[in-house]
Amino acid sequence: MHNFGTFTRILNCPSVSRISHITSFKQIINKNVINPVVSTQPRRHASGITKEEKILARVEEMRAQAQLGGGLKRIKAQHDKGKLTARERVELLLDPGSLMEYDTFVEHQCTDFGMDKNKIIGDGVITGHGTINGRRIFVFSQDFTTFGGSLSKMHALKICKIMDKAMLVGAPVVGLNDSGGARIQEGVDSLAGYAEIFQRNVLSSGVVPQISLIMGPCADFTFMVRDTSYLFVTGPDVVKAVCNEDVTQEELGGAKAHTVLSGVAHAAFENDIQAIQRTRDFIDYLPLSNREKAPVRFTDDSPTREDPSLNHIIPADSTKAYDIRDVITRIIDDGIFFEIMPDYAKNIVIGFARMAGRTVSIVGNQPLVTSGVLDINSSVKAARFVRFCDAFNIPIITLVDVPGFLPGTAQEHNGIIRHGAKLLYAYAEATVPKITVITRKAYGGAYDVMSSKHLRGDINYSWPTGEIAVMGAKGAVEIIFRHVEDRTQAENEYIAAQRGFIDDIILPSVTRKRIIEDLIVLENKQLPIIYKKHDNCPL
Amino acid sequence: MLKQFGRLIINQNKSTCYKPLFYQNTRGFHSTYIAYYADVKTFDKILIANRGEIACRVIRTAKKMGIKTVAIYSDADARGLHIPLSYIINVNSIVLFQVSMADEAVNVAIQETGAQAVHPGYGFLSENSNFVKSLDEIGIAFIGPGESAMAKLGDKIQSKIIAKESGVNIIPGYNGVVKDADHALEIANSIGYPVMLKASAGGGGKGMRIAWNDQEVIEGFKLASQESLSSFGDDRLLVEKYIDNPRHIEIQLIADNFGNVFYLPERECSIQRRNQKVIEEAPSTHLDPATRKAMGEQAASLAKHVGYVSAGTVEFLVDSQRNFYFLEMNTRLQVEHPITEYITGMDLVEQMIRIAANQKLSMKQEDIKFHGWAIESRVYAEDPEKYLPSIGRLNKYREPVSITDKNEVRCDSGVFEGSEISIYYDPLICKLSTYGVTHNISLLREVIGSSRFQSGKISTKFLGEEYPKGFKGHVLNKESLYELASVAALIHAKKDLRNWHWLDDKGALLKSTLSEQAPKSWNLWIKINNEHIKTENYPNALIKTDWALESPLINTHFQIADDLEKTITIQYIDPLPIGFRLQHLGTKFDITVHSQRQHELSQYIHEKPKQDLSKFILSPMPGSVISLAVNVGDIVNEGAELAVVEAMKMQNVIRASRVGKVKKVNVKPGDAVAADEIMIEFDEV
């Protein structure tokens, strides 16, 4: 009984399983004293007490050692780069004191290249679970101070363990990645470790949200930190050797490359602290798993609020652009919009918001950029987002102002048919509530694709400025009448409403109110899904 | 062509013995207009050939008088506030008031609607005598002066000659049109520097340049004549002595067709930037009754000399010895007319309409007295530091209201929340809490609050002297910093609790979180500008707010000690990645709120170096490129002209900030440029 009591006391002691000692690093560095044992717990085993107490003291010492990862020197190097350590990051990500760590004592088992003499407790990754604003998530955080955060077999198994747990209980996985890649000394074992993780990425997809901060193959969302994070399949040295291209890390795989050019990352942030804070904000939008509805958070914004200025937002001149984000922020709660991929394929805007407190997703054509035309990149960007939202029960609100698909050989030869089909496919298969508002143009095939009535749109509205047509009236007249200037026959806003393709024509000012009412109506929407092994969406 | 959206006018009418003939209630206006007329019918329908706040203002008086109104609008203005107030007609040109097209458009509108008279507002067609002439020809009344008086006085050169003939004091200068730049140089040297070059046909600071040396005369001549041509269709310039440290004081006149000319109390308009007024007050603190009378009588004699009718304003420069010199006469209703209305109780628009309907002014000069004091601030969509116009949408817009029932606050505006401020028109707004477009409210607040302004020791150089490097916003003192930091901490805590406030499907609180685990106290670090404040270090105070989450106004009550309490209002602008932007005392502050741990770790985060922009020339504002002075490969000196960008009818010379070789030119004349768009790139020489 006595022993059990001691054991419990130690477990409950925050200095053991929480990360509270890092504050003292600075003092240690200043004094130039390197002391691996940072715990303030008395070292009870010194005075010949019981064997159990001795073991516990040893455990505690190892735990304290694990706090330091690769040691103070490497921690200082990490700080000098303007980066935080793996533990500091976890600490900022989770609610204070909520981390429950697993596998603290894991070490690698490699014996080649003298590695058996070079072991660091924890093996370069911190894993466990904790809460963000009270909601449970699983987390792994790679420790660059330990073997450069490189992935060994044991390192991979630690990650796999929490991914399995997360799937089991239905909670998101957040990966804080800071790794040089495979641990070369382990060879094939390391590659196997990667594959194990990838397999779990795939199995978890659509079951629990997976968020990677800084890097991550196959995650749902990938966020990066500007200037200090890089992501590539092969690094600059290999590029130089194989292709004879001179390129810096930043140019090849920096945040800018991936958020603007490749579309691999979904957002970029200024520094570690900001990136982690925004990740917390982001998690707040997501249900913990596909078994839950989208979360509802308290708001002071009235669900019946009308916004008269929306009545004036569409320019009188139909060729003039406006910012669709001005429409979005006026419809949603508090005007707070978490935009995803804001710098990539800017002709479509996607992101999360809340309406009457519940998370919704927004997809809107952006007239400000190339008139909001659909092209390959924007179709793929929106398609992936729609599929995520469908998988996680997040209603989709689509704002349509689209002049069609982008014409031209560049688009056709790169497969606009195949890529445009992805967006159509995503909308057509989605079974979550789908509400569509046509703000202005809805022309041609793009009208069909943008969550039209025909793709099982639940509620389809048009503003009075809406125009649904096969093409713009001027173009249509030129084809039908061979340049006869009579547009009246080609342009009629009411035809779609007469056919029931539009449920109602609404004043822009009441859009928020109407959508919220519809979301309540659709709250328990159920659409049977036909059994199949899996679908075969265009890739 | 004055730039403006609207005005904020505060009346401090303290007089209790003031007894107007009778009261006439008007909607949303001050209620004490004196009716100087019996209610005799004037017109059935008038057309207002203007837009924005002045169109709304004229429509209001017309409605009060039972006159139907017709407003015109162009595509750029189809969402204007004056549109729903009246019958409208689209004149269908993007920029309505390009003089040549507008004339014709208005005539078409008159024929279509059967309007009997036209009120021109200010700017645009208001001082175009050809327009008046064309109205005369079709028998439509112009609510303003007659064609010949307007033509004579509208021309600055001629008006000076007339002023001299009428016995009005004038400034030493060259009375005639300047032939070319060399001629301008010659005149400038004969008068002595500094000199002012200004458009013969202009007003409102456009086509106006001050030169302190020969080089500036040559450059100024070119720019002023171009601006004058594009604004007024007339590139004639004149040169005069520039009076240092002057005050700008003007006399309002009102005259009828029966030879009556009356002068009203003066308006002091010395607070100016770019030679355009921003704050006006009436009466002036500088004038004594004798000077006031002398100025009024000279102004009236000028009007009589040319047979002027309707409302008009004679502008004077007044030096510290109260010597006054004729500047020009504005043959129209002025932007700042409401402050005169406030202190005299006279509705000037009504007077203008009645005069145009050939009614006789029934008052005497002795009847015109003033009571109290009024001030007008022009709220512009412009940055208060460099006065550059800003375009965009008014995301939040709330007009101030009088807190008493005496209508002490009047807000004339032509905009509403969601309005677009475009490059086509002048950027005048009017409001308290705006966001989205930059505005100058912080500057207006600081000027009115400054001790120098309150003491009345002002001149037209006030802004340049007080803010030599440009206005940088309110400088936080110990008290305002404490208020801001305390409110920031409070907001952070409210938002943090909200983040734990999860609801189930029925809207009930989920059990797990808020009550048990949510934070109960906060130990925060608040960073404002470069100051780090630890909330723990502040003394205990009871601070309450009724802030609805994410709403724009934060009313906060401070109970600092038993006998020390106050209530302040701070504006919540928008959230930032960590923290938020608040506006206090008219100036915006980016506020970072860190937890204790975030603060400790933030020491490791590197400040990112600002991008070196010295090799790039950015457009300082949205506008269009008028001309380019350099080509690729040119080597330019520091200060050399590179390009001219025009926005809101102001031409701005873009100059080289360093010696360099032009590497790339990204724009060509006629291109539209956005603010901060890279126009020209440099190489090292």
Image (cartoon, coloured by chain):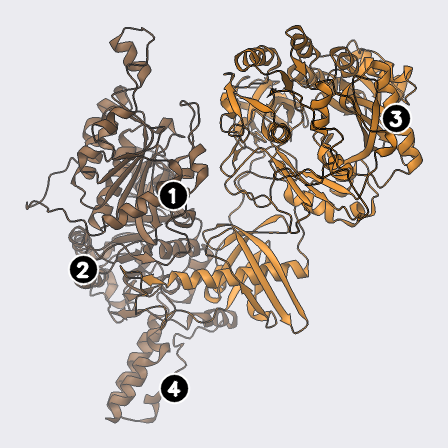
Chain colours: A brown, B orange
Mark 3: few/some/many CA within 10 Å (<14, 14-19, 20+): many
Cα gap from disc 2 to disc 4, whole angstroms: 39 Å
Which numbered disc covers residue A148?
Answer: none
Q: Which residue is mark 2?
A: A167
Q: Earlier in the sequence, mark 1 or mark 2?
A: 2
Which SS class for mark 1?
Answer: helix
Residue B303: percent from left, percent from top: 83, 19
Cα gap from disc 1 to disc 2, whole angstroms: 35 Å
Q: Are marks 1 and 2 in contact (CB under 8 Å)?
A: no
Q: Which residue is mark 3?
A: B325
Write down the chain letter for disc 3: B
Mark 2: few/some/many CA within 10 Å (<14, 14-19, 20+): many
On screen, A196 above or below B191?
Answer: below
Q: Earlier in the sequence, mark 1 or mark 4?
A: 4
Between A266 and B410, the one nearer to me in the picture: B410
Q: Residue at x 56, y 12 (%)?
A: B105
The quadrant the C terminus of chain B occupies is top right
Q: Residue at x 17, y 52 (%)?
A: A195
Q: Amino acid at mark 4?
A: Pro
Q: Amino acid at mark 2?
A: Met
Cα gap from disc 2 to disc 3, whole angstroms: 85 Å
Q: Which residue is mark 1?
A: A331
Numbered label tally: 4
Mark 4: few/some/many CA within 10 Å (<14, 14-19, 20+): few
Write down the chain letter for disc 4: A
Which numbered disc covers residue A42?
Answer: 4
Write down the chain letter for disc 2: A
Which quadrant of the figure has residue A501?
top left
Residue B29: percent from left, percent from top: 65, 39
Q: Amino acid at mark 3?
A: Tyr
